[in-house]
Amino acid sequence: MNDNADAMPPWELPGRFDVVRRRDRHGGGRPPVEPEANGLDPRTVEALYELCPPGYRNHEVLRRHPRLLVRLARHHLRAEPAELRQGYSDLRRELKDQVPVHVIPQALATYRREADEIHRAFARVAAIERALSALPPTAPEPGRDEAPRPNATHPRA
């Protein structure tokens, strides 16, 4: 028996925005959190990570400096509409012989919904960026964010 036969095609699965919205609506089982010293609520940081590629979570500097995370989220979201437009325009040609005819309009509608979600996500990121710009800059953590200094006892060769 083929387990993939009953699997939903990717365009019918909930998008990343749907998952985030559903988790936020139902509380997601998360305890209440206190605002961090950098002035940004950890839930906001988590929401920004949800808009970015998963690998961004591996970089601690983004967690310590939300201004960097906001910038990367903005750039990532800015690139997505072009990819969606390309996928939308190529869909019929690329899949006309591979999926049933009635699926194409559903897939195109999915592209349109994702484009709308990206537009709304971009507006949320812009609002977070405006809120961050109203906060004072964060001071560097000693020893963690400072640029490496040349060692005076070991001159360059």
Image (cartoon, rainbow, N blue to C red):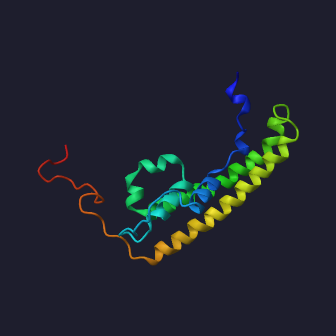
Q: Is residue 104 left or right of residue 86?
A: right
Q: Residue furthest left?
A: 153
Hey, which residue is sitting farthest top in the picture? 1
Q: Is residue 79 left or right of residue 150?
A: right
- In-front residue for pair 55/110: 110
Q: Residue at x 61, y 53 (%)?
A: 19
Q: Which residue occupies the foreground of this view, 48 or 141?
A: 48
| Percent x, y of residue 72 | 51, 57
Q: Residue at x 79, y 52 (%)?
A: 109
Quarter of the rendering containing residue 63:
bottom left
Residues 3 and 38: in front is 3
Q: Residue shown at 87%/41% (left/top)?
A: 102
The quarter in which the C terminus is drawn is top left
Residue 132: image x %, image y %? 47, 72
Q: Quadrant of residue 135?
A: bottom left
Tell me: 111 left or right of 31. Answer: right
Q: How many marks?
A: 0
The answer to whether residue 157 is above or below residue 46 is above
The residue under the point 57% across, 69% down is 126
Residue 107 versus residue 132 in the image, above or below: above
Q: Give the percent coordinates (x, y) of residue 111.
A: 75, 51
Quarter of the image with the N terminus in it: top right
Q: In the displayed structure, would residue 153 be above or below residue 116?
A: above
State the residue in front, 155 or 149. 149
